Image (cartoon, rainbow, N blue to C red):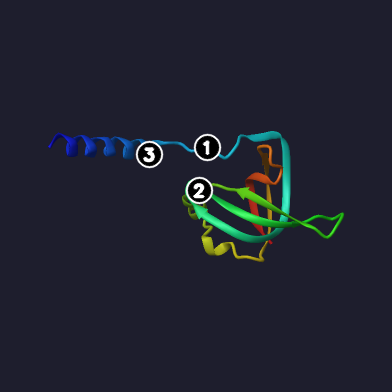
Amino acid sequence: MKAPIFLSTALSIFAAAALFAQVSPKAPPDSRTLATIEGKITSVKWLNPHVYLYVSVAIPDNSKLDSWEIETGSPAEMERSGIKLTSFKAGVAVRAAGKIVGKNRLQASASEISLQ
């Protein structure tokens, strides 16, 4: 009888802790390196705690494309701003301004996003 009570109490504590946990971005932004990324959306991950846009960017010097991962706010923040998942469709041109994140130079944390 004590085991089910202990288990339910432990699960309640872990669930409460998960509700109040703050999740940080993948890596701290490098505040010295700002970027403006322009390209076409290839896919979107609309999941908590952040929305991720995957953008194909043409490199001017050659015919290659770079694939950028752009981190934005949470889905709730996006929806409060009037942006919905259906706003981001594959092939739509997008411009994002923000900071380069971490060591992988093809990731950015966006402070501004505009669809073109």
Residue appearing at x 38%, y 36% in the figure: 20
The answer to which image quadrant residue 19 occupies is top left
**Mark closer to the observer (1, 2):** 1
Q: Earlier in the sequence, mark 3 or mark 1?
A: 3
C-alpha gap between disc 1 and disc 2: 12 Å
The residue at which mark 2 appears reads as: 74
The location of residue 26, given as percent across then percent down, is 57, 40
Q: Which amino acid does label 3 sit on?
A: Ala
Regarding mark 2 in the picture, which secondary structure is present there? Answer: loop
The disc at residue 59 is none
Q: Do the residues labelled 2 and 3 touch (CB within 8 Å)?
A: no
The residue at which mark 1 appears reads as: 24
Residue appearing at x 52%, y 57% in the figure: 82
C-alpha gap between disc 3 and disc 1: 14 Å
Q: Earlier in the sequence, mark 2 or mark 3?
A: 3
Regarding mark 3 in the picture, which secondary structure is present there? Answer: helix
The answer to which image quadrant residue 89 occupies is bottom right
Q: Earlier in the sequence, mark 1 or mark 2?
A: 1
In front here: 97 or 9? 9
Q: Which amino acid does label 1 sit on?
A: Ser
Work out which residue is located at the far left of the displayed protein and give it.
1
